[in-house]
Amino acid sequence: HEAPEDHQAHRPEGPRGPQEPPEGVEESGGPSVPAPPAYAPAVAPRPEPVDAVPWGVRVAAEAGWRLLVLAGTVYVLMQVISSIQLVVFSFTVALLITALLEPTVTRLRLRGVRRGLATTITFIGGFIIMGLVVWFVVWQVMENIDELSDKLQDGIDDLRRWLLHSPFHVTEKQINHIAKSLREAVGANTEEITSAGLEGVTVVVEVLTGILLTMFSTLFLLYDGPRIWRWTLGLVPAAARPGVAGAGPRAWATLTAYVRGTVIVALIDAIFIGVGLFFLDVPMAVPLAVFIFLFAFIPLVGAVVSGALAVMVALVTQGVFTAGMVLVVVLAVQQIEGHVLQPFILGRAVRVHPLAVVLSVAGGSLIGGIGGAVVAVPLVAVVNTAVGYLRAHSRESALRATSRPHGATIIATAPVRPPEPPGEGT
């Protein structure tokens, strides 16, 4: 066989071998693009725009737009809540009251009482007690308001005399000028005061509506709480339902422990400070003790406000010495509360950092006033418990989802049973 002819066989050979076609002319005779010279630098292709952005900027951008979406969602949610603020606040208070009364329903159920009767007894008894407390406070205030007004006027006269003889060199003319300015300010704002009175009627209607909503919500939560919870679980996606089903009871246990512990601590504070006010002969000792009990539900801020109110009443009515003694009593009780009562009663059921307490109370008061400050800390405690459980449940689910050895691998890793001695086999 003859070898195939090479395509370079017909090229004319020069003294140094086969000659290439002239520059600019292809082998077929047409023009061609000249090759770049050997000394020309290599031009790298331009990178993609995404690759040109630094990694840190890309991560910041990805996190930024997600944060913007979350912020927009929170803003829309807050607008919705503000538009139905009365309903949300009433239902939240109903949850707190239910967490306080639900253990009583459970005890009655364990004694053989039917759920409907146990719910009725607990509901009526609980709201009767709360109504009696409110009535007692109003009655005490109305009974002592005249005496407090007289002593308040005496305290203002004492303050005026002290200012006249104080080192601040305040003259009687200046004091009268300040009093005249206050009277003119009150007279100039008569219309605003009248409109505020008209708005007060609206506030009363809203308060009554909120009380009715709270009562109805509490009644149905006490009676149909488990059924409502099962219905709520039905709204959760199936993939997340096991985690939510486990987080719910733990969050409810945290809320129950917080409410019951706070009630016990507030009751102890009110009793001890009220006894101190009574023995120091401070007017309206019982209403002040009730105010201390109510303000104890606002962490940190409530104790300061109620203690300052008691000290101011003692200062105006009984003088500096009695006010100092009241301050000592308030500080002593609050120290016992912070270092003994709360760690012992609440324990580790409610794990919230003090910084989180301060920030949540401040944020709640800015959003919802006193009501927002009351519900801020239990909300943070419940969310903390639920998130912690969901995180642990997610880790456990990930571990269970890992592939186990199978096939030849499981044979290789399976424990080998040692051979039995002769004569001992079955």
Image: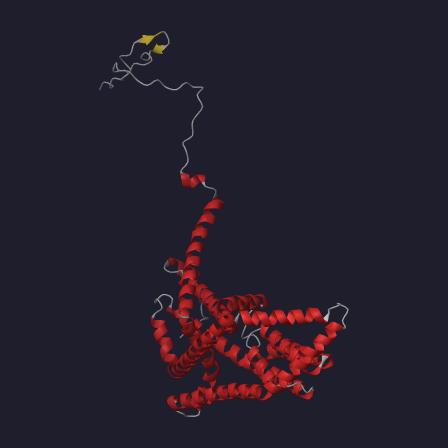
Left or right, residue 271 beside residue 43: right
Tell me the residue at 58%/65% (across/down): 355
Residue 272 higher or lower than 67, as above or below: below
Is residue 314 visible to the viewer in this orientation of the structure? Answer: no
- Give residue 90's quadrant in the image: bottom left
Question: How many discs appear?
Answer: 0
Left or right, residue 377 beside residue 221: right
Given residues 138 and 43, the one toward you in this image is 138
Image coordinates of residue 313 in percent, x first then y, are: 65, 80
Furthest residue to the left? 1
Given residues 355 and 129, the one toward you in this image is 129
Furthest residue to the top? 15
Is residue 209 visible to the viewer in this orientation of the structure? Answer: yes
Image coordinates of residue 91 in percent, x first then y, are: 42, 76
Image coordinates of residue 229 in percent, x first then y, are: 38, 76
Left or right, residue 301 beside residue 102: right
- Give residue 66's quadrant in the image: bottom left
Left or right, residue 76 beside residue 140: left
Image coordinates of residue 363 in percent, x first then y, are: 52, 66
Tell me the residue at 43%/54% (across/down): 68
